[in-house]
Amino acid sequence: MYEPRFANSQTDRLMEAVLHLHNREDAYRFFEDICTIPEIKSISQRLEVAYLLGKKETYQKIADETGASSATISRVNRALCYGADGYRRVLDAMMENETDSEKENRE
Protein backbone atom coordinates (compact mmCIF):
# COMPACT_ATOMS: atom_id res chain seq x y z
CA MET A 1 0.00 0.00 0.00
CA TYR A 2 1.20 3.50 -0.86
CA GLU A 3 2.23 5.63 2.12
CA PRO A 4 2.48 9.37 1.37
CA ARG A 5 5.28 11.30 3.05
CA PHE A 6 2.88 13.91 4.43
CA ALA A 7 0.16 11.63 5.82
CA ASN A 8 -1.27 12.44 9.22
CA SER A 9 -4.75 12.56 10.75
CA GLN A 10 -5.49 15.97 9.20
CA THR A 11 -4.47 14.98 5.68
CA ASP A 12 -6.33 11.68 6.10
CA ARG A 13 -9.48 13.68 6.88
CA LEU A 14 -8.93 15.88 3.81
CA MET A 15 -8.53 12.88 1.50
CA GLU A 16 -11.61 11.26 3.02
CA ALA A 17 -13.57 14.49 2.44
CA VAL A 18 -12.56 14.54 -1.24
CA LEU A 19 -13.71 10.95 -1.61
CA HIS A 20 -17.15 11.94 -0.32
CA LEU A 21 -17.78 14.52 -3.04
CA HIS A 22 -20.65 13.24 -5.20
CA ASN A 23 -20.59 15.54 -8.20
CA ARG A 24 -19.05 18.62 -9.80
CA GLU A 25 -21.27 21.01 -7.83
CA ASP A 26 -20.19 19.42 -4.54
CA ALA A 27 -16.57 19.70 -5.64
CA TYR A 28 -16.91 23.38 -6.60
CA ARG A 29 -18.61 24.19 -3.30
CA PHE A 30 -16.03 22.31 -1.23
CA PHE A 31 -12.98 23.73 -2.98
CA GLU A 32 -14.41 27.25 -2.93
CA ASP A 33 -14.75 26.97 0.84
CA ILE A 34 -11.43 25.25 1.55
CA CYS A 35 -9.11 26.99 -0.95
CA THR A 36 -8.54 30.51 -2.14
CA ILE A 37 -9.41 31.28 -5.75
CA PRO A 38 -5.69 31.56 -6.67
CA GLU A 39 -5.04 28.14 -5.07
CA ILE A 40 -7.84 26.56 -7.11
CA LYS A 41 -6.55 28.20 -10.29
CA SER A 42 -3.02 27.02 -9.56
CA ILE A 43 -4.10 23.44 -8.92
CA SER A 44 -6.30 23.35 -12.03
CA GLN A 45 -3.46 24.85 -14.12
CA ARG A 46 -1.09 22.10 -12.98
CA LEU A 47 -3.65 19.43 -13.85
CA GLU A 48 -4.06 20.95 -17.33
CA VAL A 49 -0.28 21.04 -17.73
CA ALA A 50 -0.13 17.34 -16.80
CA TYR A 51 -2.85 16.58 -19.33
CA LEU A 52 -1.00 18.44 -22.10
CA LEU A 53 2.33 16.84 -21.19
CA GLY A 54 0.58 13.48 -21.50
CA LYS A 55 -0.41 14.49 -25.03
CA LYS A 56 3.30 15.19 -25.72
CA GLU A 57 2.74 18.91 -26.29
CA THR A 58 5.80 21.17 -26.23
CA TYR A 59 6.62 23.33 -23.23
CA GLN A 60 6.03 26.42 -25.40
CA LYS A 61 2.56 25.30 -26.50
CA ILE A 62 1.67 24.38 -22.90
CA ALA A 63 2.88 27.77 -21.66
CA ASP A 64 0.87 29.53 -24.38
CA GLU A 65 -2.32 27.55 -23.67
CA THR A 66 -2.20 27.57 -19.87
CA GLY A 67 -0.12 30.58 -18.92
CA ALA A 68 2.07 28.28 -16.81
CA SER A 69 5.71 29.20 -16.31
CA SER A 70 8.46 26.88 -17.53
CA ALA A 71 9.24 26.17 -13.86
CA THR A 72 5.67 24.98 -13.25
CA ILE A 73 5.69 22.87 -16.40
CA SER A 74 9.01 21.34 -15.38
CA ARG A 75 7.75 20.63 -11.85
CA VAL A 76 4.64 18.88 -13.21
CA ASN A 77 6.77 16.92 -15.68
CA ARG A 78 9.03 15.80 -12.83
CA ALA A 79 5.97 14.62 -10.90
CA LEU A 80 4.76 12.70 -13.95
CA CYS A 81 8.14 11.03 -14.39
CA TYR A 82 9.20 10.46 -10.79
CA GLY A 83 6.19 11.17 -8.58
CA ALA A 84 3.56 9.04 -6.91
CA ASP A 85 1.56 8.48 -10.16
CA GLY A 86 -1.26 10.68 -8.87
CA TYR A 87 -1.61 12.73 -12.04
CA ARG A 88 -1.51 9.67 -14.26
CA ARG A 89 -4.08 7.74 -12.24
CA VAL A 90 -6.52 10.65 -12.18
CA LEU A 91 -6.10 11.55 -15.85
CA ASP A 92 -6.45 7.90 -16.94
CA ALA A 93 -9.63 7.52 -14.86
CA MET A 94 -11.06 10.75 -16.24
CA MET A 95 -10.36 9.67 -19.82
CA GLU A 96 -12.01 6.29 -19.21
CA ASN A 97 -15.18 8.02 -18.01
CA GLU A 98 -15.42 10.59 -20.80
CA THR A 99 -18.46 10.54 -23.02
CA ASP A 100 -18.02 10.40 -26.79
CA SER A 101 -18.94 14.10 -27.14
CA GLU A 102 -16.36 15.07 -24.51
CA LYS A 103 -13.73 13.08 -26.44
CA GLU A 104 -14.66 14.89 -29.65
CA ASN A 105 -14.45 18.30 -27.95
CA ARG A 106 -11.03 17.42 -26.51
CA GLU A 107 -9.64 16.51 -29.94
Image (cartoon, helix red, strand yellow):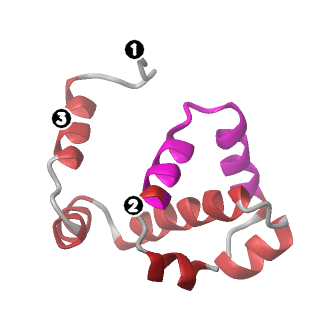
Q: What secondary structure characterizes most of the magenta part? A: helix
The image shows residue 85 at horizontal and vertical percentages of 56, 35
Q: Is 4 left, or right, of 30 in this rendering?
A: right
Mark 2 or mark 1: whose residue is earlier in sequence: 1
Residue at x-position 16% and y-position 66%: 26
The residue type indicated by label 3 comes to: Arg
Q: Nearer the viewer, residue 31 or 18?
A: 18
The residue type indicated by label 2 comes to: Asn
Q: Is 28 left, or right, of 97 in this rendering?
A: left
The range drawn in magenta is 71-95
Residue at x-position 18% and y-position 70%: 29
Distance of label 2 from label 1 (alpha carbons): 25 Å
**Quarter of the C terminus within the rendering:** bottom right
Q: Are marks 3 and 2 in contact (CB under 8 Å)?
A: no
Q: Quadrant of residue 13?
A: top left
| Residue that carries the numbered disc 2 in the rendered image | 97
The image shows residue 6 at horizontal and vertical percentages of 40, 25
SS under mark 2: loop
Mark 3 or mark 2: whose residue is earlier in sequence: 3
Residue at x-position 66% and y-position 50%: 76
| Residue that carries the numbered disc 3 in the rendered image | 13
Question: Few, some or many C-alpha atoms within 10 Å of disc 2 (few <14, some 14-19, many ≥20)?
Answer: few
Comparing marks 2 and 1, which lies closer to the viewer? Answer: 2
* 3 in the magenta segment: no
| Residue that carries the numbered disc 1 in the rendered image | 1
Comparing marks 3 and 1, which lies closer to the viewer? Answer: 1
In the image, residue 2 above or below residue 84 = above
Distance of label 3 from label 2 (alpha carbons): 26 Å
